[in-house]
Image (tube, rainbow, N blue to C red):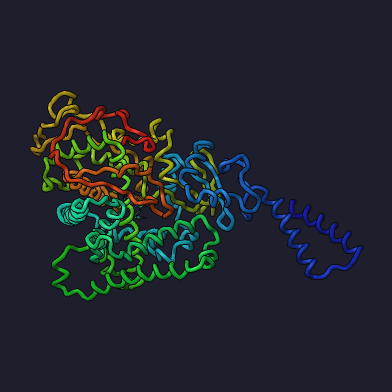
Amino acid sequence: MALVMAGIGLRRLLERQMIKRKRTPIEYAVLATIGCFVAAIIKYPNRAILTNPRPDLKALGRDAPGYPLIGNLTDILFHREDPLDFLHKTFQEHGDVISITMPLLGRAIILNRPEFMEHIFKTNFDNYVKGDMFRWNLTDIFGRGIFVADREEWRFHRKTASNIFTTKLYRSLVEGAFKSSAEDFSTVLDRAIAIDKPVDLQDKFLKLTLDAFGKLTFGLEFKALLSEDGPNEFGDAFDFLNSAADSRMANPIWFITDRIIPGRWKKHWGCIGILDEYAAKAVRNRRAETPEQAAARTRDLLDHFINYKSEDGTMLTDRELRDVFVNFMIAGRDTTAQALTWQFYCLMANPRIMNNILHEIDTVLEGSTDKITYEVLMNELPYVKAVFHETLRLHTPVSKNVKQAVDDDILPDGTRVYKGEFIGYSNWCMGRNKAVWGIDAELFVPERWLASSDVPPGTPGGSGDSGLTANPATGRRVSPFGKFKPESQFKFIAFNAGPRLCLGMTFAQLEAMATTCILLQRYQFKLTPGHPEPMVKGSITLPMKEALMTIVTKRTDGPVRASPAAAAVGGDGGSVHLSQREE
Ligand code: HEM
């Protein structure tokens, strides 16, 4: 209708003009272009070009749903420095289902409630895929690896990789690799203490997980941690590509802008070249191994993929192995390092919680690293586990995500989704949603992850006591903090949920908890005076924008500290908002 009216108007205008004089072809072309433009504005008055009207959906951020032809492009560009805060405020203002339109990308419906997550992650899992747009944005970095794969391709990656994540592996990781990387970390901290120098914990945790993950899964010795401030070309290339991947999601013409910005395209491909080289090295080393060398070490992720044979006997090519390498390095390195970084920040900013975690570690482990085993980490340190989960609730390393609808669908609240539309969600925003987590959703309260203690308060080992009771089954001292209380996957989506639940969830938890226990047994951590509240840097994961500068000293108070601070189980107990931390 709009097009017809604009056409009639344009024709009348041209007829009137033609009476005066004859127009040149260029003038006709200009007039036709203006006409089409006006018609398009009339047709798409408040949404991106080529999107369908959806009066049933709430708009993003203001009363008008968007601008003509560009929809919400300006909202996204304007908030590219603080997209998570912006989205969080928008949800608070407009409810838990909002919608945006973007030119060339189309419409995204962004959801913020567990029942929606259950629907897209499980109930109608097959209808929500990564999709072609996601792959088009990320294929030069991720190749055809698990993160961009759908359907059969995804099933293959998932099945092959699942084989390595066994309890046997976890036991050996805790006893060996995780403890030995914490020893390297201690060496670095001792050096800093000796010269009285603050440490950037973010940088060190990234190096720790790079070393551990590179060695454990691909047999690569990065030695990034011990080389201290030396060049870290792999880490730098990774960081650059993570940011590039993130900015593409909000920039529908990245393939033009990336080529125009001086030096960017070259740097992009230079970084991809570095990743390719490391992957090739890992594969080359492995192919050159003798059977005796192979037998002398534990089977790792690369072994599973390199030895894989399809039914017709085909094996993976070097290019396919490269994609496995890149996808798993991104999954395993940055996420756990960032979880540890945010966790140490939260502990340093909340002395009451720091005191409680030290109390539990000292009580259960009695100052010994030998007592850190798979079983103890999984079952006997509920407060350490609660601190890790609470960190992920508020500072989830995978903070936002998108899926595409294969077919029309109806969400649990009756909202319609049409084929090709995108579904967005933010783990970061849902972790702060008061309707989901209660009025203290924005506070750091590990106690929300604890069930009441079995031990009545006041008895030895109960909360409020120094915890000297032994568990009759194990002979070990019990934590005074009761039991860890897990949440539903669809409420706590830091690790995704349903069939695509993070494969490294237990791996990450054990690595983070073992590292935390060993470091807190030995050192005291304090933010440097006047340290600002950390900001988030744009990336597909959640790095801090600036370094986490920390003063580290050796612990002098020894194991088994004073009683836990008030409200060990349940309640706020004096937790501070992250922006009002105790100095
Ligand atoms: C705190 C640390 C971690 C967090 C918060 C985390 C979170 C996530 C999330 C949200 C996803 C879904 C991503 C998507 O579909 O786009 C995911 C997938 C995945 N993660 Fe993790 N992850 C962590 C650590 C790890 C580690 C250490 C490994 C490997 C050892 C790992 C391996 C994977 C893999 C292979 C997938 C793809 C699963 C699939 O698509 O079937 N993750 N992770």
Place residue 485 in its image quadrant: top left
Q: Where 379 sits versus 38, above or below?
A: above
Q: Where 516 sits versus 331, above or below?
A: above
Residue at 38% from the left image edge and 59% from the top image edge: 239
Q: Where 566 sits versus 33, above or below?
A: above
Tell which of 337 and 191 is nearer to you. 191
Residue at 54% from the left image edge and 52% from the top image edge: 77
* Figure disc tally: 0
Residue at 90% from the left image edge and 66% from the top image edge: 21
Residue at 50% from the left image edge and 59% from the top image edge: 133
Q: In the rendered view of the protein, which quadrant contains the C terminus? A: top left
Image-based side of 268 in relation to 573, left or right:
right
Is residue 441 among what the camera can see? yes
Is residue 173 among what the camera can see? no
- Give the x, y percent position of residue 90: 52, 40
Place residue 560 in its image quadrant: top left
Image-based side of 391 in relation to 70, left or right:
left
Image-based side of 57 in relation to 532, left or right:
right
- Give the x, y percent position of residue 279: 31, 69
- Give the x, y percent position of residue 418: 55, 50
Tell which of 561 and 7 is nearer to you. 561
Q: Where 264 sits versus 413, above or below?
A: below
Q: Residue furthest front?
A: 195
